[in-house]
Image (cartoon, rainbow, N blue to C red):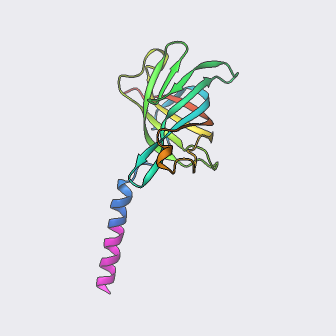
Amino acid sequence: MKVAALALMGFVVSAQVIVGQQPSTSIDVPEGAHSVLQARGEGVQVYSCNAAPSGQKWTLKGPDAKLLDSSGQVIGTHFAGPTWKLNDGGQVQGEAIGNKASPEAGAVPWLLLRAKPGTGTGSLAGVGYIRRTETHGGAAPGTGCDAASDAGKTVQIPYSATYTFYEAKKE
């Protein structure tokens, strides 16, 4: 009985260690951060077919999208980096720190990104976090990157998402 209990305790500890090593699935913005801008991204996610250990695989090259305000006016662009650049000159780059599967099949995941230090300029200089939600489309295709002859092929998958920019809490 003691051996079974110890084995079970060891399994629980092992499971906690494994879970602790996985990327965060939270897209919650840290407490104290507040929204400074929300924009709708509309465009494509660009993928290239590249060699992988198990054959060929679609690899994300990056987005190519327009950023629109609530009235539908283009206020900027979103491109590889990932980078968001506004028409007023504001710009920021991000790095993903959390993700959550989209509730919509075939859609890219929802993300929480942290602004890369020193990349925020202009109206986006104070941005600490960017959250991508309400995604539609954009996921890599399931086929078309199977043969060696597919290497180097690119596809553009239409997508849209809501991007919310947050200023970090001031210390």
Of the pair 36 and 85, the residue shown nearer to us: 85
Q: How far from the left and from the top, in percent, is residue 127?
A: 45, 25
Location of residue 125 (image quadrant): top left
Q: How far from the left and from the top, in percent, is residue 32?
A: 46, 33
Of the pair 10 and 77, the residue shown nearer to us: 77
Q: Residue furthest top?
A: 88
Along the horizontal axis of the image, is 95 left or right of 39?
A: left
Task: Name which residue lies at 59% across and 33% down.
Answer: 44
Is-magenta flag for residue 7?
Answer: yes
Q: How far from the left and from the top, in percent, is residue 170?
A: 40, 26
Q: Magenta residues?
A: 1-13
Q: Quick one: quadrant of the N terminus?
A: bottom left
Task: Name which residue lies at 45% across and 38% down.
Answer: 30
Q: Is residue 129 above or below residue 27?
A: above
Q: Residue furthest bottom?
A: 1
Q: Is residue 168 visible from the viewing direction of this image?
A: no
Q: Is residue 118 above or below residue 95?
A: above
Task: Name which residue lies at 69% across and 22% down.
Answer: 72
How many numbered marks does the figure carry?
0
